[in-house]
Image (cartoon, rainbow, N blue to C red):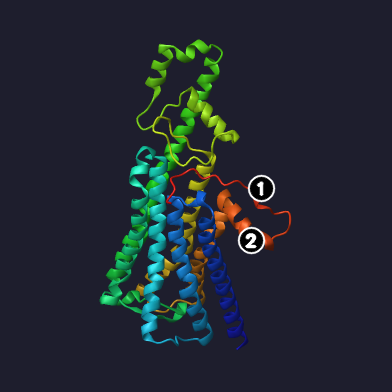
C-alpha cells in the first residue's frame, strides 16, 4: 500500500507539473505574439501551431491520465476513450507536422530567400498552417473507420491506438508521421547549415580582400577588381561587395535597422547572428522531440511483438517523457530567443526579483509579417 501510494504520488505530481507548466508556457506564447506585432511572423505562426498541439496535450490527455492513475482504471466510458485517443494522436501528428513546416519555412527563408516572399505570402502561410491540421485529422481518422482501433492502454493509463489491432497501421504511421517529417527536417536544416557556413566563409574572404583593397581605394572601382569578384562567385552563393560587407558589419554592431521585415532583391542575403540563433533553436526543438518521443515509439514495437506486458515503470516513463516535450518547447524559446525572452519577462515580471527587467533584451526578428 505504501509503495503504491508513493508511486501514485510521484507519477501524478510529475505529470501535473508538466501539464500545468506546458499549459502556462504555450498559452503565454499566444499572448506574447498577440501583444507584439514584431513577433507576428510566418515562422511564429507555425510555432503557435505547435503550441496549439501542446495545449491539447495539457488540457485533454494529461488530466485524464492523472485521474486514471489515481483510480487505477479507465472510468470515463468507451466513447470518451475513443475520443481521447483520437485527440491524443491528433496532437502528436500536428506537432511533428508543425516541426516539419517550421523546417521548410526556415529553409526557404535562408537558402531560397529570393523566392521566400512568393512561397510564404500571408495567404499561403495561413493555408499551410491549416493544411497541417487537415493532414493530422486525416491520419488520425483511420482507427475511427476500422483500420486499427483506439483502446485503453493500462500500462500508460490512457487511451491511444492499440497497435496490435493492426500492425500495418503502425508501420504506416511511423513512416508517414515520424520518418517522413524527420527526413524533411534533416534535409532542411542540413542545407541551412551548409549554406550559412559557405556564406560566412565567403564574407570572411571578402573582408580579407577588402582590407587589402582599402589601402588602394582606386582598386574598389577598377574593372579588373570587379571581374575577379565576379569570377569567384559560386552558383547559389551571392558574392558580397564592399557595401554588403559594410552592412553586415553594421548588423553585427547593432547599427542596422533590425526591424526591417523584407529582403531587398537588389542586395545580397545576410544571415544575422539572431537568425542563426533562431535556426539553432529549432534544431534543438527537433532534437528534443526525437529524444522525448523515441522511447514511446520503441514501446510501440514491444507492444506488438513482445509477448508479455512491459514493466509499468518503463511504460509510464516513456509516456511522461513524451508529455515533457510539450513543456520544453516554450522553455527553449524563452531561453534562446531574445524576442520571446523579453515577452516572457514582460508578462511575468511582477513575479520575478527586481533585477530581472525586460528592457535588457531587444526584440529583433526581421522577417515577413503574417499580419
Residue at image location 48% in from the left, 27% down from the top: 244
Q: Which quarter of the figure has residue 178?
A: bottom left
Q: Nearer the viewer, residue 352 or 314?
A: 352
Q: Earlier in the sequence, mark 1 or mark 2?
A: 2
- Disc 1 + disc 2, Cβ < 8 Å: no
x, y (%) of residue 269? 44, 34
Residue at image location 65% in from the left, 52% down from the top: 358
- Residue 92 sits above or below residue 248 on the image: below
Q: Secondary structure at mark 2?
A: helix
Q: What residue would you read off at disc 1?
A: 360
Q: Residue furthest left?
A: 146
Q: What residue would you read off at disc 2?
A: 348
x, y (%) of residue 158? 44, 78
Residue at image location 40% in from the left, 58% down from the top: 98
Q: Secondary structure at mark 1?
A: helix
Q: Is residue 176 left or right of residue 34?
A: left
Q: Nearer the viewer, residue 216 or 316?
A: 216
Amino acid at each position: 500500500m505504501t509503495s503504491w501510494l508513493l508511486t501514485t504520488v510521484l507519477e501524478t505530481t510529475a505529470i501535473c507539473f508538466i501539464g500545468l507548466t506546458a499549459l502556462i508556457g504555450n498559452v503565454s506564447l499566444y499572448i506574447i505574439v498577440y501583444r507584439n506585432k514584431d513577433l507576428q511572423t510566418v515562422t511564429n505562426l507555425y510555432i503557435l501551431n505547435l503550441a496549439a498541439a501542446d495545449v491539447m496535450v495539457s488540457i485533454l490527455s494529461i488530466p485524464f491520465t492523472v485521474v486514471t492513475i489515481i483510480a487505477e482504471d479507465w472510468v470515463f466510458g468507451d466513447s470518451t476513450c475513443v475520443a481521447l485517443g483520437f485527440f491524443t494522436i491528433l496532437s502528436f501528428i500536428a506537432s511533428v507536422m508543425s516541426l516539419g513546416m517550421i523546417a521548410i519555412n526556415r529553409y526557404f527563408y535562408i537558402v531560397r530567400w529570393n523566392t521566400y516572399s512568393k512561397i510564404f505570402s500571408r495567404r499561403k502561410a495561413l493555408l499551410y498552417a491549416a493544411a497541417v491540421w487537415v493532414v493530422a485529422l486525416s491520419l488520425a481518422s483511420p482507427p475511427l473507420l476500422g483500420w486499427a482501433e483506439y483502446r485503453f492502454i493500462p500500462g500508460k493509463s490512457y487511451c491511444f491506438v492499440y497497435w496490435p489491432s493492426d500492425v500495418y497501421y503502425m508501420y504506416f504511421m511511423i513512416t508517414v508521421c515520424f520518418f517522413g517529417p524527420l527526413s524533411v527536417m534533416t534535409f532542411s536544416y542540413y542545407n541551412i547549415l551548409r549554406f550559412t557556413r559557405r556564406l560566412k566563409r565567403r564574407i570572411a574572404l571578402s573582408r580579407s580582400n577588402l582590407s587589402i583593397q582599402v589601402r588602394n581605394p582606386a582598386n574598389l572601382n577598377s574593372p579588373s577588381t570587379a571581374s575577379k569578384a565576379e569570377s569567384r562567385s559560386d552558383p547559389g552563393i551571392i558574392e558580397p561587395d564592399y557595401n554588403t560587407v559594410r552592412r553586415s558589419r553594421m548588423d553585427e554592431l547593432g547599427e542596422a535597422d533590425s526591424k526591417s521585415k523584407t529582403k531587398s532583391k537588389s542586395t545580397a542575403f545576410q544571415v544575422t547572428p539572431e537568425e542563426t540563433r533562431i535556426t539553432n533553436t529549432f534544431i534543438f526543438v527537433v532534437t528534443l522531440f526525437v529524444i522525448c518521443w523515441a522511447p514511446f515509439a520503441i514501446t510501440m514495437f514491444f507492444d506488438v511483438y513482445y509477448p508479455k506486458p512491459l514493466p509499468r515503470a518503463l511504460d509510464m516513463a516513456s509516456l511522461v517523457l513524451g508529455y515533457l516535450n510539450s513543456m520544453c518547447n516554450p522553455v527553449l524559446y524563452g531561453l534562446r530567443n531574445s524576442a520571446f525572452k523579453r515577452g516572457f519577462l514582460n508578462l511575468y515580471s511582477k513575479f520575478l526579483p527586481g533585477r530581472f527587467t525586460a528592457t535588457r533584451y531587444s526584440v529583433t526578428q526581421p522577417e515577413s509579417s503574417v499580419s
